[in-house]
């Protein structure tokens, strides 16, 4: 083992933060940090309030929405999701987003997983919930959302992953959790 491998992990200390952009959904800052050997470096950091998503099963099918994703310049099929409002509980946000986007309301939600989407440059934490108990509610998408709602089979979901129509981490995680649930009865 060389010296670099044997060295202890080092917490980067922030010397200064330069705010670059403050938007409705994200902010961008550049932090100057101290490295283990005393040198300095910069870190570009996206600050995000977090988000919640729902893996909702309706009659054995997964509720999804299809929408155009501008950063990718293509349509994507995803589980319903949205950002957290300031101070909002992720469970509350998940229930809200499911109904707003699909028109279905969860009778109960269970946390499936929570993870950081891109920890190399962003602090966004995404909470994914599960329900197989839904009832008809009222669809009320955001004014700038153009969504197509669909309930798909596991086979369709797997085909959409292969085709690239499903390519985001939260939805892929949901599909594989659904497959595990189908095979074992457990999440």
Image (cartoon, helix red, strand yellow):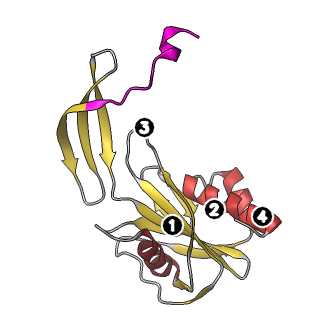
Q: Is residue 186 above or below residue 164?
A: below
User: If you read the primary sequence from the N terminus, does the residue marked by circle 2 or circle 3 appear first?
Assistant: 3
User: If you read the primary sequence from the N terminus, does the residue marked by circle 3 or circle 1 appear first?
Assistant: 1
As measured in the structure, the alpha-carbon distance from the residue carrying label 2 to the one carrying label 4 is 13 Å
Neighbourhood count class around disc 3 (C-alpha, 10 Å): few under 14, some 14–19, many 20 upward: few
Quadrant housing residue 23: bottom left
**Residue that numbered label 1 is attached to:** 53
Q: Is residue 40 above or below residue 176?
A: above
User: If you read the primary sequence from the N terminus, does the residue marked by circle 1 or circle 2 appear first?
Assistant: 1
Does the CB distance between marks 3 and 1 fall below 8 Å? no
Neighbourhood count class around disc 2 (C-alpha, 10 Å): few under 14, some 14–19, many 20 upward: many
**Residue that numbered label 4 is attached to:** 155
Does the CB distance between marks 2 and 4 fall below 8 Å? no
Quadrant housing residue 70: bottom left
As measured in the structure, the alpha-carbon distance from the residue carrying label 2 to the one carrying label 3 is 23 Å
User: 119 or 140: which is nearer to us?
Assistant: 119
User: If you read the primary sequence from the N terminus, does the residue marked by circle 3 or circle 4 appear first?
Assistant: 3
As measured in the structure, the alpha-carbon distance from the residue carrying label 3 to the one carrying label 4 is 33 Å
As measured in the structure, the alpha-carbon distance from the residue carrying label 1 to the one carrying label 4 is 21 Å
Query: Which contiguous range is marked in magenta?
Result: 1-13
Answer whether residue 168 is visible to the viewer in this image: no
**Residue that numbered label 3 is attached to:** 120
Say which element carries label 3: loop
**x, y percent for residue 24:** 25, 60
Q: Which residue appears at 59% of the width and 59% of the height?
A: 171
**x, y percent for residue 161:** 67, 54
The numbered mark at residue 174 is 2
Say which element carries label 2: helix
């Amino acid at each position: 083992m060389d010296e670099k491998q044997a060295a202890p992990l080092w917490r980067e200390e922030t010397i200064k933060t330069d705010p670059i952009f403050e938007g409705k959904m994200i902010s961008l800052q550049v932090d100057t940090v101290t490295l283990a050997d005393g040198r300095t470096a910069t870190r570009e950091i996206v600050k995000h309030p977090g988000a919640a998503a729902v893996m909702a099963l309706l009659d054995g099918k997964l509720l999804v929405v299809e929408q155009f994703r501008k950063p990718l310049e293509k349509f994507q099929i995803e589980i319903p999701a949205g950002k957290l409002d300031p101070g909002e509980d992720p469970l509350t946000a998940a229930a809200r987003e499911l109904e707003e986007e699909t028109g279905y309301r969860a009778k109960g939600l269970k946390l499936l997983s929570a993870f950081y989407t891109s920890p190399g440059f962003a602090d966004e934490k995404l909470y994914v919930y599960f329900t197989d108990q839904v009832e008809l509610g009222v669809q009320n998408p955001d004014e700038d959302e153009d969504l197509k709602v669909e309930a798909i089979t596991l086979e369709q979901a797997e085909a959409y992953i292969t085709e690239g129509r499903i390519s985001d981490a939260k939805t892929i995680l949901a599909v594989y959790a659904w497959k595990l649930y189908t095979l074992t009865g457990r999440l």
